[in-house]
Image (cartoon, rainbow, N blue to C red):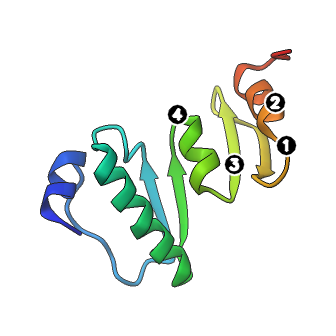
């Protein structure tokens, strides 16, 4: 990965090449739009090679654009898990806020 990516995210600057599960906690928070696009390309490549990517984000558009499944946790508890296929936006928002949004 590019040195600028490591610096801008404040990450440790290392990646295990044999990892089967990769956890990313808010990795796009400090990235430019170009860097976010590049990160998503890297995530897609990792998934292609069989890695599972656990991506933690508060940016809902990223969730719908990139990911296959979503899990919502509130107050340290699991409240919702769903594949991101079909109409899940209303259910997802309800899980996030803890009440009906309509």
Q: Position of residue 84 (x, y in %)?
A: 75, 52
Question: Would you say the residues marked 1 and 2 are in contact, meaning their CB atoms lie under 8 Å apart?
Answer: yes
Question: Is 14 left, or right, of 97 in this rendering?
Answer: left
Q: Residues within 10 Å of mark 2 (few under 14, many from 20)?
A: few
Q: Which mark, by number, is residue 87?
A: 1
Q: Residues within 10 Å of mark 4 (few under 14, many from 20)?
A: few
Q: Is residue 62 above or below residue 101?
A: below
Q: Nearer the viewer, residue 19 or 37?
A: 37
Residue at image x 35%, y 82%? 17
Question: Sequence order check: which comes first, mark 3 or mark 1?
Answer: 3
Residue placed under numbered mark 4 in the picture: 58
Question: Would you say the residues marked 1 and 4 are in contact, meaning their CB atoms lie under 8 Å apart?
Answer: no
Question: Would you say the residues marked 4 and 3 are in contact, meaning their CB atoms lie under 8 Å apart?
Answer: no
Give the CA separation, mark 4 to mark 3. Answer: 12 Å
Residue at image x 68%, y 59%? 68
Q: Residues within 10 Å of mark 1 (few under 14, many from 20)?
A: few
Is label 2 in a helix, a strand or a loop?
Answer: helix
Is label 4 in a helix, a strand or a loop?
Answer: loop
Q: Which numbered disc, 2 or 4, marks the residue closer to the eye?
A: 2
Q: Nearer the viewer, residue 24 or 68?
A: 68
Q: Position of residue 45 (x, y in %)?
A: 46, 76
Q: Which numbered disc, 3 or 1, marks the residue closer to the eye?
A: 1
Residue placed under numbered mark 2 in the picture: 90
Residue placed under numbered mark 3 in the picture: 70
């Amino acid at each position: 990965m590019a040195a600028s990516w490591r610096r801008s995210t404040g990450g440790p600057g290392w990646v295990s090449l044999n990892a089967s599960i990769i956890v990313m906690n808010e990795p796009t928070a400090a990235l430019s739009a170009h860097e976010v696009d590049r990160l998503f390309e890297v995530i897609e490549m990792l998934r292609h090679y069989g890695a599972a990517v656990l991506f933690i984000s508060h940016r809902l558009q990223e969730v719908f654009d990139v990911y296959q499944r979503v899990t919502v946790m509130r107050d340290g508890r699991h409240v919702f898990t769903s594949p991101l296929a079909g109409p899940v936006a209303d259910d997802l928002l309800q899980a996030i806020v803890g009440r009906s949004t309509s």
